[in-house]
Image (cartoon, rainbow, N blue to C red):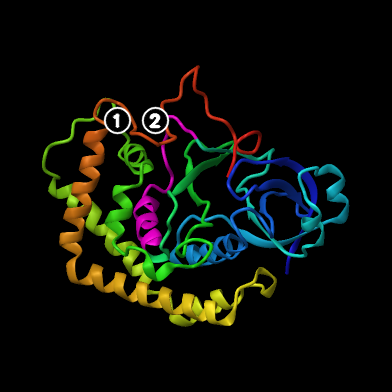
Amino acid sequence: MPIRMVTYIRRMRGGSSPHMMCAEDGHPYVVKLLGNPQGNGVLLNELLASQLGKMMGLPVPEVREVVLDPHIFEDAPYLSERNRRSQLHVAIRVPVTFLTGQVFDVISRAARLRNPQAIYGACLFDAWTGNVDRRQFVFWKTCRQHLYSVLLIDNGYCFGGPHWKLGLQRLDPIQYAAVMPELKFLLGVADKVWWRDILVPKAMSLQEIAKIRENLRFWTGKLAQIENEQIETAVRQAPSEWGASELDLGSLTQDLIRRKEALVSWAKEGTDAAASRFGRVLQQLRFASGNGDCGSGTRYRRQDSSSSPKALACSGGL
């Protein structure tokens, strides 16, 4: 059942020209509209990636189909006439309300994460879904919490992008780890160390290899538990208004099933070797950050008076 957006808050940054609105349940949502510049495929991608991520047990936001209340256009000068005619859009729920907590896209290096193991799952998830965009995270906590929770967001370019070229995308999770600039920062948080002060040996320790192997097996086991029927049901729930044909949906379903089986086989046949290779990638990322720099392109930096985090609920973006 679609939820209704009743209050317009502001326009947000992003290639899909999203907007922040408040729904009738009182929660803020980031709304991606039908007819956005990136195409209608990103709406289905957001909805489907959220469902598949939940099946794997990953921290993904709740994504809902939404309709816009007619009077919301009075306060929304950026909404076009086409948006007025469209009936069904997609919205990503912000994990906390304006009064109960905050969401950050930048956090201190001294911060602590509640769910650091999710970074390994993100690599496997991006490989399964063929994410062609840079993996993006946000960090949230309630007003009374001291630990941050990491959340996987911006899944509009999963499945090979809005045009669903999933079969052409690479399948190796380690390749996704190698190009994930946030990974070195998140691992620094997970290990409870400062990257400026860390000293990494040239060879990964047995404990580190064991940790990587354990996480790879854990998330691969989660992926293996997903039934093919669950994948098909999730894909078939795409609203017809978003323009997905039966042929496209069937092809996407088969690609997802084949990639899932290939990843499970990959992990079963060479988990030890994969863990070692994964460890070498992470070690290279650590060496790249040995001077305290988080690497080119990363948005995560040390929090100080000249670089304070911005709360999503007030001024940031999803």
Q: Compared with residue 309, is residue 14 higher up or lower down, i.e. above or below?
A: below
The magenta span reads 106-127
Residue at image x 27%, y 55%?
174
Residue behind mark 2: 109
Query: How busy is the neighbourhood of tag 2: few (under 14 within 10 Å), some, or many (20 plus)?
Result: some
Residue type (three-letter) at the residue carrying disc 1: Trp
Q: If the image is split into quadrants, where does the C terminus sit?
A: top right
At numbered mark 2, what does the secondary structure look like: helix, strand or loop? loop
Check residue 195 in the rendering and tell me which mark sits there, or answer none. Answer: 1
| Residue 9 locus on image (x, y percent) | 75, 41
Residue 215 falls within the magenta-colored stretch: no
Looking at the picture, tell me which residue is in the foreground, 157 or 307. 157
Tell me where residue 82 sits by quadrant: bottom right
User: Is residue 125 located in the magenta-colored stretch of the structure?
Assistant: yes
Residue 222 pos. (x, y %): 38, 68
Disc 1 secondary structure class: loop
Q: Residue at x 44, y 52 (%)?
A: 133
Could you classify mark 1 by the number of other residues whose Cα lies within 10 Å: few (under 14), some (14-19), or many (20 or more)? many
Q: Position of residue 8 (x, y in %)?
A: 78, 45
Q: Is residue 238 rendered to the left or right of residue 257?
A: right
Residue at left offset 29%, top offset 30%: 195
Q: CA distance from mark 2 to mark 1?
A: 8 Å
Label 2 with label 1: CB-CB less than 8 Å: yes
Q: Residue at x 49, y 61 (%)?
A: 161
Comparing 208 with 250, the one in front is 250
Residue 215 appears in the picture as rendered: no
Q: Is residue 13 above or below residue 198?
A: below
The amino acid beneath tag 2 is Arg
Q: Say which label, 2 or 1, has the lower sequence index.
A: 2
- Observer-nearest residue: 54 or 80? 80
In the image, residue 41 above or below residue 15: below
